[in-house]
Amino acid sequence: MLRRLLVSASNPAPLGRRGERIAARYLKRHGYRVLARNVRAPMGEIDLLCESPDGREIVVVEVKTRRAGGRGQPEPEASVTRHKRAKLVALARWAQAANRWHDRPTRIDTLGVLVDGRGRASVRHVPNAVEARGG
């Protein structure tokens, strides 16, 4: 699913934080409830911790933001490596245990944000992009 949002090109915030704000806004518009941002855990950080639109699932969201470049550039979310996927699985398990969400399914989504030279962002949300049971 690809959506276009307008963001200010003069925003001084670092690109990653901008991308996370764009991602949170996108998810809220699509019915997700953002429970927390930048959740620090012993093994890393969860960019966005959400509840699915139906309220059944906990969703760990990895946000990848890039500036638009030349042709042939991979999508931002393509930079989620095998190591990062394993870390996301560990983070999802940690969040589930820390919050006693053992009875709630947890999934891991990626959300790629590509910002062009005019400050417009393309958002690509990939639900269940990482298998939560393995790396």
Image: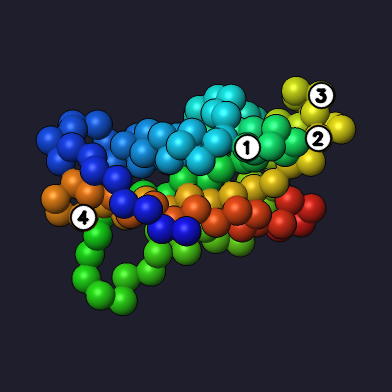
Foreground tag (4 vs 1): 1
Question: Residue type at mark 3?
Answer: Arg
Foreground tag (3 vs 4): 4
Indicate whether 36 appears above or below 128.
Answer: above
Question: Residue type at mark 1?
Answer: Pro
Using the rendered view, name the quadrant where residue 53 is placed: top right
Foreground tag (1 vs 3): 1
The residue carrying pointer 4 sits among few (fewer than 14), some (14 to 19) or many (20 or more) residues within 10 Å by Cα, namely some
Q: Which residue is mark 4?
A: 116
Question: Residue type at mark 2?
Answer: Arg
Q: Which residue is mark 1?
A: 53
In the drawing, what numbered circle is on residue 104? 2
**Mark before the other along the chain sequence, 1 or 2:** 1
Quadrant of the image containing the C terminus: bottom right
Indicate whether 75 appears above or below 91.
Answer: below
Cα distance in 3D space between marks 3 and 4: 41 Å
Depth check, front residue: 82 or 120: 120
Q: Residue placed at 75% from the left, 24% from the top?
A: 98
